[in-house]
């Protein structure tokens, strides 16, 4: 049975978020205390920010994530990395190999309605990627919920569910949004 653990998820999944420490002077970092990087735990979520030099200017990149590992093998079961975007939140979900990719992944908050399946984008050595984007209404439900359920089908046709804890989600989202400004 997977065990939820918060670990830093510093893998560039979509090219939009690269979390790498970079040198920056205190006035330009925009992070507390002039730091060049930051990592904070918020319940089962981790907020990470880093200042990276891109084309001669410092850019602040912030996201919040959760990674789950199997308590016995210590292998990653899933990882999700999100960032505030407009009135919602978007990011990338990494699921293990062995899933029926053509079936996609469906999301359900607690016992609410199950959304339409989201297509897998591709697979990389870390696993198979599902882009996620939640609008303002879904974000409000995530903030109030306790679990984000992910419904997938294994290659053999067996349902293979995953669950992401939403403990700390509201504060992780708020902190990431504040730091990203």
Image: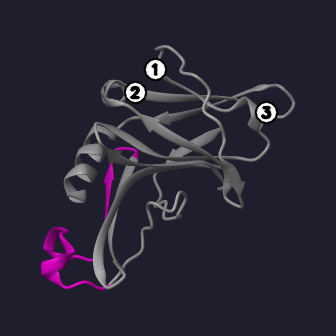
Q: Is residue 109 magenta?
A: no
Q: Nearer the viewer, residue 15 or 162?
A: 15
The colour scheme applied to this rendered structure is one colour
Task: Determine the image quadrant of residue 140.
Answer: top left
The residue tagged 3 is 154
Badge 2 local density, few (<14 within 10 Å), some, or many (20+)? some
Image position of 122 with respect to 145: above or below: below
Q: Position of residue 12 (x, y in %)?
A: 52, 64
Q: Secondary structure at mark 2?
A: loop
Rendered-image quadrant of the C terminus: bottom left
The residue tagged 1 is 110
* Labelled pair 1, 3 in contact (Cβ < 8 Å): no
The number of callouts visible is 3
The residue tagged 2 is 146
Q: Is residue 38 magenta?
A: yes
Badge 3 local density, few (<14 within 10 Å), some, or many (20+)? some
Q: Nearer the viewer, residue 169 or 27?
A: 27
């Amino acid at each position: 049975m997977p065990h939820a653990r918060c670990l830093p998820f510093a893998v560039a999944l979509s090219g939009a978020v690269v979390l790498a420490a970079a040198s920056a002077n205190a006035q330009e970092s925009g992070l507390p205390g002039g730091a060049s990087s930051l990592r904070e735990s918020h319940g089962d979520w981790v907020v990470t920010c880093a200042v990276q030099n891109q084309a001669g200017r410092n850019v602040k990149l912030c996201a919040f994530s959760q990674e789950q590992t199997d308590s016995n093998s210590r292998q990653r079961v899933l990882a999700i990395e999100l960032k505030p975007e407009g009135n919602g939140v978007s990011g990338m979900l990494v699921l293990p190999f062995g899933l029926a990719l053509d079936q996609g992944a469906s999301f359900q908050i607690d016992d609410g309605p199950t959304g339409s399946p989201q297509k897998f984008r591709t697979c990389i050595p870390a696993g198979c990627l599902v882009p996620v984007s939640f609008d303002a209404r879904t974000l409000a439900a995530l903030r109030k919920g306790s679990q984000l359920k992910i419904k997938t089908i294994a290659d053999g046709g067996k349902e293979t569910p995953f669950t992401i804890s939403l403990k700390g989600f509201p504060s992780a989202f708020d902190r990431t949004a504040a730091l990203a400004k």
